[in-house]
Image (spheres, helix red, strand yellow):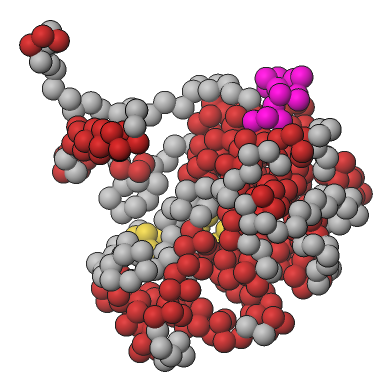
């Protein structure tokens, strides 16, 4: 079909499709349907049990549920205590907290050393895989590139469909190890073929932490500072896991429940995470801040920044979606504990990079945005900065390209996905199958000559 004819066809048929897909919004409340699997207050419908992580954003006071400072627990341990623990001893946390989430207990020194060796031994791809899979058909969308690579890796696994705990654990550990490679190599391929820059394919170093390897594989000179590696390590730990109800983790449970293989499950989770409403949110923050700097004459003037934020909410600025990106969360209201932990390191990195002015702007917006939202919106719960508000700023200071922002999230979150896959396989033998109520009227078939 000619392009012009196809465009006209799609335009007409899309309108027909849109009309016949639309459902009266009032029917959701009338029939008691929980849109987005949430109740009228935005609280998620209880769909399962987990022992992996816990989010606390409210408490009972005199029989009433009231918001409280957000808290996040990994396997019962407060995330604040976990980060303080490995930072106090000047250790990288990714490998240690990965062990905790997968196996349910903190490793001792010998267990941690052995586990690091296991992850390091998995940092290898099949022969010619980089050349034949990653470097061919490069894409600006690195999440799609990663999904392609993961599904192709299944072809190299003789036990791809074996759902025994030992085999699934092997597959998960291997994917955790190679995620940084397939993401960074995917970017390098895109940067070489599409942007015309030099091609760098650095092998990971088995003596380095995950955060150090990400930086040295990405940078042409393989160099990084201890502070840079430490901040990236903290980012990975904070993004590793966040309850069973977030979209990509729920996807992990759903696809696992069907009996599918590990590669398909992780690919499905990746496809969920790449959405701008989930893992792509930090990109929107960076783009929003760029637009603010281009349209606000004096970014140190609170009143000028406040006016811009109001324009955002009134769909008069940036992408005209009516959102201040990085503000608010489906669960937290008063505070996101991850953002509070992260902010301390963001400030240190900003000072080191000479970007204190940018940090002050972020801090100003963190304070102003909840007030502006409160003035302009009728909201049922408080609003605070979430971890995505600062993560994009951090990645930009680490010279991580925009195309890798969501893949960095994935390099961390695959740990949580793996833990939830193992938990689903252990405890549940029923396929997840929620109900959808049909509101279509019964119609009589019409012969084609009479239509």
Q: Position of residue 213 (x, y in %)?
A: 80, 56
- Horizontally, residue 172 falls left or right of residue 51, namely right
Up the image or down, 20 lies above or below 292; here it is: above
- Horizontally, residue 369 falls left or right of residue 393, namely left
Does the magenta run of residues contain 152? Answer: yes
Up the image or down, 127 lies above or below 95; here it is: above
Residue at the farthest left position: 450
- Horizontally, residue 323 falls left or right of residue 219, namely left
Up the image or down, 427 lies above or below 134; here it is: above
Res 73 visible: no
Residue for point 75% across, 70% down: 228
Tag count in the figure? 0
Magenta segment boundaries in residue numbering: 151-165
Q: Which image quadrant is residue 393 in?
A: bottom right
Q: Position of residue 96 (x, y in %)?
A: 78, 53
Residue for point 71% across, 64% down: 232
Q: Position of residue 346 (x, y in %)?
A: 64, 75
- Horizontally, residue 343 falls left or right of residue 172, namely left
Image quarter of the C terminus: top left
Up the image or down, 16 lies above or below 405; here it is: above
Between 399 and 1, the one lying in front of the other is: 1
Between 3 and 354, the one lying in front of the other is: 3
Residue for point 47% across, 73% down: 289
Does the magenta run of residues contain 48? Answer: no
Between 206 and 96, the one lying in front of the other is: 206
Image quarter of the N terminus: top left
Residue for point 69% across, 27% down: 154
Res 360 visible: yes
Q: Which image quadrant is residue 444 in?
A: top left
């Amino acid at each position: 079909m000619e392009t012009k004819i196809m465009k006209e066809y799609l335009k007409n048929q899309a309108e027909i499709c849109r009309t016949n897909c639309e459902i009266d919004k009032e029917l959701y409340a009338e029939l008691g349907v929980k849109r987005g699997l949430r109740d009228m207050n935005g609280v998620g419908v209880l769909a399962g049990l987990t022992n992996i992580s816990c989010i606390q954003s409210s408490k009972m006071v005199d029989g009433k549920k009231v918001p409280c400072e957000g808290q996040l627990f990994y396997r019962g341990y407060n995330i604040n205590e976990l980060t303080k623990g490995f930072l106090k001893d000047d250790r990288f946390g990714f490998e240690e907290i990965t062990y905790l989430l997968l196996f349910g207990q903190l490793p001792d020194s010998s267990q941690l050393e052995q586990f690091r060796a296991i992850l390091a031994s998995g940092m290898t791809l099949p022969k010619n895989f980089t050349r034949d899979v990653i470097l061919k058909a490069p894409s600006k969308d690195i999440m799609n590139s990663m999904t392609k690579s993961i599904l192709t890796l299944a072809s190299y696994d003789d036990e791809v469909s074996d759902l025994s705990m030992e085999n699934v654990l092997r597959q998960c550990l291997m994917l955790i190890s190679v995620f940084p490679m397939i993401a960074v190599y995917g970017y390098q391929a895109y940067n070489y073929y599409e942007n015309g820059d030099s091609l760098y394919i650095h092998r990971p170093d088995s003596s380095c932490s995950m955060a150090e390897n990400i930086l040295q594989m990405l940078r042409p000179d393989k160099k990084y500072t201890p502070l840079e590696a430490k901040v990236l390590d903290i980012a990975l730990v904070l993004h590793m896991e966040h309850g069973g109800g977030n979209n990509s983790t729920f996807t992990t449970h759903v696809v696992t429940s069907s009996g599918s293989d590990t590669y398909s499950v992780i690919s499905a989770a990746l496809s969920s995470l790449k959405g701008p409403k989930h893992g792509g949110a930090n990109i929107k923050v960076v783009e929003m801040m760029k637009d603010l700097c281009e349209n606000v004459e004096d970014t140190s003037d609170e009143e000028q920044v406040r006016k811009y934020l109001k324009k955002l909410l009134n769909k008069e600025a940036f992408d005209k979606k009516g959102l201040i990106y990085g503000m608010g969360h489906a669960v937290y209201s008063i505070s996101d504990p991850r953002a509070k932990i992260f902010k301390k390191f963001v400030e240190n990195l900003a000072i080191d990079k000479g970007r204190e002015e940018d940090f002050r702007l972020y801090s100003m917006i963190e304070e102003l945005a909840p007030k502006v939202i409160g003035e302009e919106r009728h909201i049922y719960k408080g609003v605070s900065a979430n971890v995505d508000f600062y993560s994009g700023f951090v990645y930009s200071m680490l010279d991580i390209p925009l195309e890798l922002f969501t893949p960095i999230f994935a390099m961390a979150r695959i740990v949580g996905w793996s833990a939830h896959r193992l938990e689903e396989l252990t405890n549940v033998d029923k396929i997840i199958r929620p109900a959808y109520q049909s509101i279509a009227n019964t119609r009589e078939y019409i012969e084609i000559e009479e239509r």
